[in-house]
Amino acid sequence: MKSVRKALRDGELDKDTYERVTCAECGKALKTKNDPDTITTIRICPDCGEEWKELR
């Protein structure tokens, strides 16, 4: 699973005008899944199901 930062550099993710992270393929804003026991947040595209991890 790639990180959000690396995916932004590789063009897999974009930021919209409100600085929300969006999937470059679908154009949809990413959903988040938090696990309180880890220091990462999982960002998920609601359309294509791709996942990226992000440090909190």
Image (tube, rainbow, N blue to C red):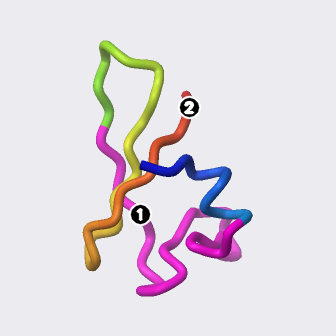
| Few, some or many residues within 10 Å of mark 1 (<14, 14–19, 20+) | many
Cα separation between marks 2 and 1: 15 Å
Residue at the image position 38 percent from the left and 18 percent from the top: 38
Q: Could you tell me residue 31's position as x and y percent?
A: 35, 57
Q: Is 30 a magenta residue?
A: yes
Residue at image mark 2:
55
- Image mark for residue 48: none
| Few, some or many residues within 10 Å of mark 2 (<14, 14–19, 20+) | few
Q: Could you tell me residue 39's position as x and y percent?
A: 46, 20
Residue at image mark 1:
30
User: Could you tell whether 45 is left or right of 22 in the image?
Assistant: left
User: Of label 2 and label 1, which has the lower sequence position?
Assistant: 1
User: Could you tell whether 37 is left or right of 55 in the image?
Assistant: left
User: Could you tell whether 33 is left or right of 8 in the image?
Assistant: left
The residues colored magenta run: 10-33
Picture quadrant where residue 49 is located: bottom left
What amino acid type is highlighted by mark number 2? Leu
Q: Could you tell me residue 1's position as x and y percent?
A: 42, 49
Rendered position, 4 above or below 12: above
User: Could you tell whether 56 is left or right of 5 in the image?
Assistant: left
